[in-house]
Image (cartoon, grey):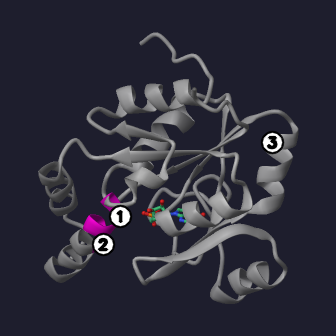
Amino acid sequence: MSKKPGLTVLAGPTAVGKGTVSTYIRDHYPEVWLSVSATTRPPRPGEIDGVHYYFKSKEEFDALVAAGELLEWAVVHGQNTYGTLKSTVDAAIAEGRSVLLEIDLQGARQVKKAVPDAQFVFLAPPSWEELVRRLVGRGTESAEEQQRRLETGKVELAAEPEFDHTVINDDVRRAADELVSLMGLTPRPH
Ligand code: 5GP
């Protein structure tokens, strides 16, 4: 029996395509309230403050942590810090919206402690070989960084049993539709 909560957390290994699936949902399912995280990462070309992330300095981020304003936060890939703003998520849930967090595994574990009745969805690659192909094919990381992320990926894949559901990202649209179904929404005919 699937949970039909206000809050769904999507996590999964590096390079599995969480960002692509959540972008698809942002573009095609406006009824889903997709949380906008705070991050110390600098914006990439085309990214808009307040739409893709709230871009913060390290000092601003530390102040959010100190003020207890984050539902969860984590350093991702040992580089930048990312976190979910508690007040915006609480407000969306209070409004009865279907809320989606797309966060890393460490963050998902923190949310599980804070909100145990949320729904936790693991986005998995069709196979380990496909995950390697996506990570290497992306071409944005050095060979050394790729190796490091693959090691992390192995550990991350082992976390699947901690989740309520697994969605396989074999096709972005199909995976997004399955995810919105799990959120209790009706997928659009395409
Ligand atoms: P990117 O820098 O490519 O946008 O995201 C890098 C990673 O940060 C992704 O794995 C994404 O899931 C994770 N991430 C984004 N926002 C948050 C957040 O608010 N909390 C946590 N824990 N991870 C996040």
For the residue marked with disc 1, what is the amino acid? Glu
Q: Please give the label number shown on residue 156.
A: 1
Could one spot residue 101 in this view of the protein? yes
Q: Quadrant of the N terminus?
A: top right
Where residue 68 sits: x, y (%)?
82, 76
**Sequence-first tag of 2 and 3:** 3
Q: Quadrant of the C terminus?
A: top left
What residue sits right under mark 3 in the picture? 93
Identity of the residue furthest to the top in this view = 189
Q: Find out whether the residues at labels 2 and 1 contact each other: C-beta distance under 8 Å.
A: yes
Q: Which amino acid type is shown beneath numbered disc 3?
A: Ile
Q: Secondary structure at mark 2?
A: helix
Task: Tell me what residue is drawn at x 40 percent, y 40 percent.
Answer: 166
- Which stretch is magenta? 152-157
Query: Cβ–Cβ below 8 Å for labels 2 and 3?
Result: no
On the image, the x and y values in percent for residue 142 come to: 19, 78
Residue 155: say if magenta: yes
- Which mark's residue is nearer the viewer, 1 or 3? 1
Residue 14 showing in the rendered view: no
State the residue position of label 2. Answer: 152
Which is more N-terminal, label 3 or label 1? 3
